[in-house]
Image (cartoon, rainbow, N blue to C red):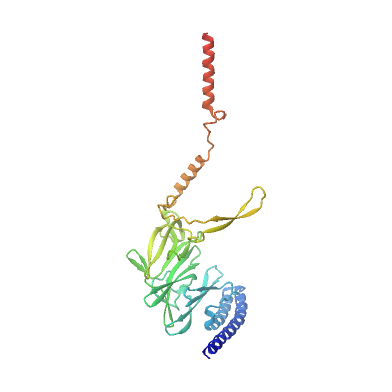
Amino acid sequence: MKVLISILSILAISLMSIAQNANLASAEATLEKLLLDLRSADNNADKEAKNNLFKAELEKVLQDKAALDYPFSSLTTIGFIDSPDGLMRIVNWNIEQDDFSQKYSCFVMHVDKRKKSYHVTELKDVSFDMPMKPTEIIPSDQWYGALYYKIIPVKKGSKTLYTVLGWDYFSSMSQLRVIDVIYFTGRTVKLGSPIFKIGKETKKRMMYEHSKKAMMSLKYEEQRERIIFDHLSPESPSMKNFYSFYVPDMSYDAFVLEGSKWILHEDVIGTNPHNDAKKQVVFVKNEKTGKLERKVIKSEWINPENPNDPTGGSEHVAVTPESAIEDAENEEKSNEPKVDKRDKRDPSNVSFYKDVEKKKSRRKNKKKRR
């Protein structure tokens, strides 16, 4: 009897899930039409009106808990970013304005495991009426606006703080990379937490402004539990503190997770992810036949931080323009053709032929003396 009840329960859950997915698929088709209409809007007023329609419909759809892991694959210009623990999802998009600035929309979906409840909260972009780089904890209705692309859960006691990585258009000359924290107190969503430690200083969020001419890398390395990013420097010393002229300088910094804090480590070594596969398949061109041939080679990861490596290790050195020019000149010299000393018949070996001429003149002089 118990087995029969279990089977019936599983069947009921499966049927319910199918019905929910069918409802969400139908809702997704409606959302797709509204989104296409929004993306074809001609001016700011039209964009705002159509975005409000799309946002209202989307909020209704997201109230269904099944939307927490539904793919919404047809909404290609909307970001759906999931937390690794499956308890949070960010739904995020931008609307380009007539002057090429950006407005952002965002919903945060989350499950409260303790109260067994599910909530959807809108983050409201009020960036035009707030400090450009807010430093305090802010509520959901006073959001600075950004596009998020990564969620990293950090445990702090019984709470989970969700570190998020994002990007913001910011201004006509500069852009922002953002590292922030989203956390929940019941239904309430807040942004910012004092978990970023830089020396003796602690900050609630990090914002890196830099030139639009360059792209700053900001990513999470799960194996090393660190957020690694380009170190920014002014294009010239006279541009110090003018952040629209800051660019990556070929060195890297990282926030390393230690307990529940992100600790800044400067001038770290950036490496490719460790490849656990022992073998790797490559395709090599056969010079005789001109065809590609499949070859299996052994894959070995070399740790550049290990000085006992067969390669001798690797020390991180920032590259300056002067050193780059010097390296290029040295490489050019090394590529000059060298005379093979063993081949004395080489016409370029001038010293050899001078020696031969001397020997001939000596022989002539000896004959004359005789």
Query: Height in image: 327 above or below 146?
Result: above
Q: Nearer the viewer, residue 11 or 364?
A: 11
Q: Quadrant of residue 296?
A: bottom right
Q: Nearer the viewer, residue 167 or 271?
A: 271
Left or right for 247, reference 25: left
Q: Position of residue 27 (x, y in %)?
A: 60, 82
Q: Nearer the viewer, residue 327 or 295?
A: 295
Q: Position of residue 289 (x, y in %)?
A: 67, 49
Q: Nearer the viewer, residue 143 or 358?
A: 358
Query: Height in image: 114 above or below 164?
Result: below
Q: Quadrant of residue 32?
A: bottom right
| Residue under the image location 48 percent in, 83 percent down | 118
Which residue is at the far right? Answer: 289
Q: How many numbered marks appear?
A: 0
Q: Is residue 62 visible?
A: no
Q: Quadrant of residue 204?
A: bottom left
Q: Position of residue 268 (x, y in %)?
A: 41, 58
| Residue under the image location 47 percent in, 45 percent down | 327
Q: Is residue 70 visible?
A: yes
Left or right for 176, reference 200: right
